[in-house]
Amino acid sequence: MLRLLGKSPWAVADQLLISATNFATTVLLARGLSQEAFGSFTLIYSVLLFANSLQSGLITLPHNILDTARHGEDYTAVTRPPPPSASSSSGPSLHSRCWRLGPSPAAPPGLWLPCC
């Protein structure tokens, strides 16, 4: 049986538990709420899931991929937030290295675009 789960049976068990809990919660809410209230819950929950996916895809995963080989002060220098008055050319940080304000480093504050 453990061979079917692969090399990470705890990862499969964790995903199974989370999925089953989410399913049970949704069923209980669908039975306990009116259609309008459940529809509102579903819309808000969908927006939160979308925001979580954006955060994961645009921030967490690039950070985990780009900075796996960094250690010690090198890692700290890249991942610390820039000072409030720092520009994108103030030195290495996750914000200045992987994100730019607009299409060029000299663009005014506004839209954050990935440049990695």
Image: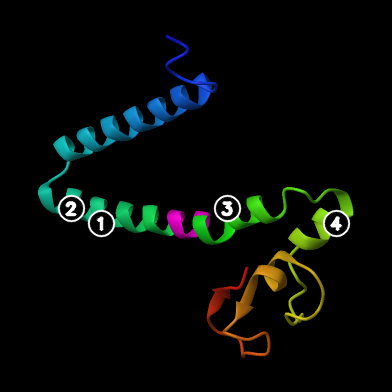
Give the left or right position of residue 52, taking residue 65 as reference: left
Disc 1 marks a residue whose amino acid type is Leu
Q: How crowded is mark 2: few (under 14 residues within 10 Å), some or many (20 or more)?
A: few
Query: Mark 4 — residue?
Result: 74
Residue 41 lies, in percent from the top left, at 25, 51
Q: In which quarter of the image is the N terminus?
A: top left
* Sequence-first tag of 3 and 2: 2
Query: Mark 2 — residue?
Result: 39
Disc 1 from disc 2: Cα separation: 6 Å
Disc 3 from disc 4: Cα separation: 19 Å
Disc 2 marks a residue whose amino acid type is Gly
Q: How crowded is mark 3: few (under 14 residues within 10 Å), some or many (20 or more)?
A: few
Residue at (31, 54) in percent of width and height? 46
Query: Mark 1 — residue?
Result: 43
* Sequence-first tag of 1 and 4: 1
Residue at (82, 74) in percent of width and height? 91
Residue at (45, 19) in percent of width and height? 5
Closer to the camera, 13 or 4? 4
Query: Mark 3 — residue?
Result: 61
Give the left or right position of residue 43, taking residue 84 as reference: left
